[in-house]
Image (tube, rainbow, N blue to C red):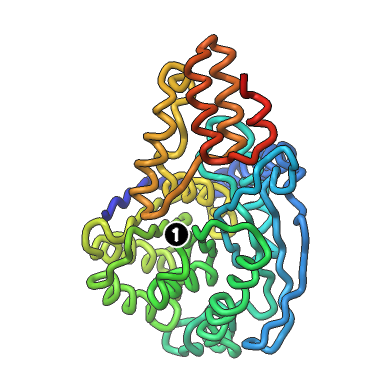
Amino acid sequence: MTNYFTVVYRQSTAGNFCSMMRRIRKMFLMAGMLMCFFAIAQQAVTADSTLTLHSQILRQDRLIDIQLPKNYYNPKFAKAAYPVIYVLDGEMNFQLVAALERFDTKFMYRPHPELIVVGIRNIDRTKDFTPTPENPEDGTGKNFRTAGGAEAFLSFIEKELKPFIHRNYRTNGFDILHGHSFGGLFTIYTLVKKAQLFNAYISIDPSLWWDNRRVVRDAQRAFASTDYQKRSLFVAMAQEPEDIWNDKTSHSETIRKFCEEILPLNPEKNLYTYWKYYPEYDHGAVPVASTLDALKKIFDGIELPVKKVPGNPETVLQSYRKLSEKLNFNLKPEESLLYQLILYTQQQKQTENSRILLDYALSLYPESSQLNQLKP
């Protein structure tokens, strides 16, 4: 189902002074948001582990950062399996996604499930993320001489990285790819070339101008005919430059045309597409706001009306059943969420309904010691 949305907001400039004041205000806003965000979720901004994975395909060692869900090794919990989000530009964006995952899954109001976060650090991002060599006609000049290695990098992810993660960690088979800028270009390239590799794709301010919009043309052909089996694509667009005529690559214009003209082409119910314009965030800052929005849209319907659960525990089952149908994937509520809901329902003096929730939780996690201890 094509369900794209736009938030469009344009500001007129009133001279250089007003422009400067807006930039200063945004700088302070971003600094404040980042300080608060990472202060709240500070336990998540370092990887649980950083490992070196040797790639036969790339003929090099790659550094991989991994953060596991908070209760992954907690002996009170059953050994559950989790979705995985693969984060490109790992040295920059891994900490953001890892902190977001920790904070968003602390409470009962959860916009997305608990996730295993995998960050892929760069060696040569231009080479890995671009599908074709540089094209002097696209306005970039000769700045990207190593470009054109996306096919090999995609093969590394498909044949080496993902199998390694699935062999060594408890994964449930729902995978997400997250990329920004050139990483966003690679994300859409992957959707077009091998959509089956991931269930959802997050492309943040992608460099779709590359090689005279080659990936855009490929996507246009693919979106018109491919059955994507209810996969999701979220595209974020950062603020447009004030002097758009000096944007030699037509970066913003290309993203907007892609979102407005190409995304609606997919046959109904095959590819869920969403996009959003962020006029207050420039190219470097836009991942902060858009990553959360993307996860919320992909898992739209997962956030429960918590206050209604004690009176109607069936709400939990119904919500996850509906979301699973939308995702074409059997997604179940985490034990940590169910445990909190059971205690909350008990606090509301709904004894019978708390028992219903407990029975449901034990049907999903029969080996949980903490759930079994709640049995009367």
* Mark 1 residue type: Ala
Q: Is residue 245 left or right of residue 284?
A: left
In the rendered image of this protein, does residue 329 appear above or below residue 351? below
Would you say 174 lies left or right of 82 here? left
**Location of residue 356 in the rendering, given as x and y in whole percent from the top left corner:** 48, 24
Q: What residue lies at 60% left-to-right and 67% top-to-bottom?
A: 88
Q: Secondary structure at mark 1?
A: strand
**Residue 366, quarter of the rendered image:** top right
Q: Nearer the viewer, residue 203 or 281?
A: 203
Q: Position of residue 39 (x, y in %)?
A: 74, 39
User: In this rendering, does residue 246 appear at all?
Assistant: no
Count of numbered badges drawn on the protein: 1
Q: Position of residue 175 (x, y in %)?
A: 51, 61
Judge whether 216 appears above or below 104 on screen. Answer: below
Q: Is residue 133 visible?
A: yes
Residue furthest to the front in view is 376
Q: Residue at image x 27%, y 77%?
A: 221
Give the quarter of the image for residue 338.
top right
**Residue closest to the eye, 233 or 198:** 198
> In this picture, is 210 found above or below 281?
below
Q: Residue at x 42, y 64 (%)?
A: 252
The spot of residue 99 in percent (x, y) is 67, 47
Name the residue carrying label 1. Answer: 200
**Quick one: quadrant of the C terminus?**
top right
Residue depicted at x 47% and y 65%? 198
In the picture, which quadrant includes the N terminus? bottom left
Q: Is residue 179 above or below residue 100?
A: below
